[in-house]
Image (tube, rainbow, N blue to C red):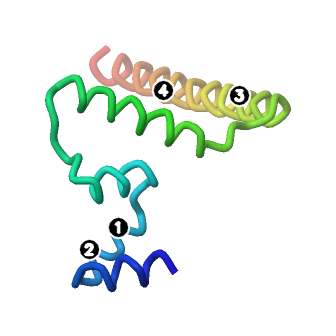
């Protein structure tokens, strides 16, 4: 319904219609009201409102998910550290063996 309304209001191309449908509600209202530019304080205020609006859309992980994800990252980083350290040790031994 909203897309049809926008399409009928202005003769938009498909790309413009897609971009308009992907905009947040605040951006759409500001473009319709002609508030695209402004002084530095208006733009800063608009930026802050847009950041808050986007943060409200975020699905935050639960405590259990956060603990699980943190554990996975720590295990993976430890594994990579071990692999790189082993690789470094082998290259060091080979270098001393060759150049001795």
- Residue drawn 29% across the image and 83% down it: 14
**Residues tagged 3 and 4 counted as in contact (Cβ below 8 A):** no
Spatial CA span between label 1 and label 2: 6 Å
The residue pinned by badge 4 equals: 90
* Circle 2 residues within 10 Å: few <14, some 14–19, many ≥20: few
Do callouts 4 and 1 mark residues in contact (Cβ within 8 Å)? no
Residue under label 1: 20
Find numbered disc 4 in the image and state the secondary structure of the residue it sits on.
helix
Q: Nearer the viewer, mark 1 or mark 3?
A: 1
Residue displayed at 24% across by 32% down: 43
**Residue 20 on image: x %, y %:** 34, 67
**In the rendered structure, which disc, 2 or 3, sits on the residue that comes first in sequence?**
2
Figure check: 8 above or below 44: below
Residue 70: numbered disc: 3
Please report the residue visible at 27 percent of the width from the left and 19 percent of the height from the top.
Answer: 99
> Which of the pair 46/72 is nearer the observer?
46
Answer above or below: position of 9 versus 94.
below
- How many other residues sit within 10 Å of disc 3, few (<14), some (14-19) or many (≥20)? few
Left or right of 2 in this view: 67 = right
Quarter-of-image position of residue 93 = top left
Q: Choose the circle earlier in sequence order: 4 or 2.
A: 2
* Nearer mark to the viewer, of 3 and 4: 3
Alpha carbon of mark 4 to alpha carbon of mark 2: how far? 57 Å
Q: Say which element carries label 3.
A: helix
Q: Nearer the viewer, mark 2 or mark 3?
A: 2
Relative depth, front residue between 71 and 29: 29
Q: CA distance from mark 3 to mark 4?
A: 30 Å
**Which callout, 3 or 4, points at the residue further toward the start of the chain?**
3
Residue 42 percent across, percent down from the top left: 24, 29
Judging by the rendered image, the residue that carries numbered circle 2 is 16
């Amino acid at each position: 319904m909203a897309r049809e309304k926008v399409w009928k209001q202005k003769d938009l191309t498909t790309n413009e219609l897609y971009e308009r449908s992907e905009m947040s509600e605040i951006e759409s209202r500001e473009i319709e009201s002609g508030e695209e530019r402004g002084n530095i304080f208006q733009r800063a205020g608009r930026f802050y409102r847009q950041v808050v609006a986007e943060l409200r859309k975020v699905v935050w992980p639960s405590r259990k998910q956060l603990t699980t994800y943190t554990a996975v990252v720590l295990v993976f980083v430890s594994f990579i550290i071990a692999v790189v350290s082993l690789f470094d040790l082998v290259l060091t031994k080979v270098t001393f063996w060759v150049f001795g």
